[in-house]
Amino acid sequence: MTDAERKLWSGLRGEQLGFKFRRQHPLGAFIADFACLEPKLIVELDGSQHVDNQAYDMAREAFFKAQSFAVLRFPSNAPFQNLDGVLSAILHQLNSLAGVAPIPAFPQRGKEPDTAQGAKP
């Protein structure tokens, strides 16, 4: 496991996003960096070696999709530069696949100033 994979795993393990992930999960002749089996999502971190292996990556992704998995790909430096953003994108995709409607964050009364037009300060 690479440092980038360890960093991302720190945010995926233990169902922190509400979904169970497996790391280095074998599927057919391939190994997914991270796999959520329900709903079906594969998360891949692409390092520089992927530039030279594009045909292999395309075959691998086609196999995952043929097994009804959605595939999210991130550059290998993404977990270091914006872990929260990567986890947010993964959670959004998981919720979309699971048919979960996003819950809007409403301000609690008395906690935040009312900025609506005509509101009295």
Image: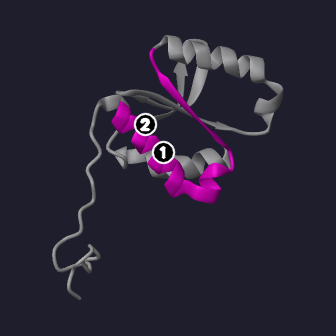
Residue 23, position as x, y percentages in the image: 51, 35
Residue topped by disc 2: 93
How packed mark 1 is, by other alpha carbons closer than 10 Å (few <14, some 14-19, many 20 or more), is few
Secondary structure at numbered mark 2: helix
Q: At 50% across and 56% down in the image, what residue appears?
A: 84
Secondary structure at numbered mark 1: helix
Quarter of the figure with the C terminus: bottom left
Q: Quadrant of residue 54?
A: top right
Residue topped by disc 1: 89
How packed mark 2 is, by other alpha carbons closer than 10 Å (few <14, some 14-19, many 20 or more), is some
Q: Amino acid at mark 2?
A: Gln
Residue 61, position as x, y percentages in the image: 61, 20
Residue 60: within the magenta? no
User: In the rendered view, does 55 fall on the left or right side of 120?
Assistant: right
Residue 79: within the magenta? yes
Q: Quadrant of residue 80?
A: bottom right
Quarter of the figure with the N terminus: top right
Q: At 61% across and 13% down in the image, what residue appears?
A: 29
Residue 111, position as x, y percentages in the image: 22, 79
- Magenta span of residues: 68-96
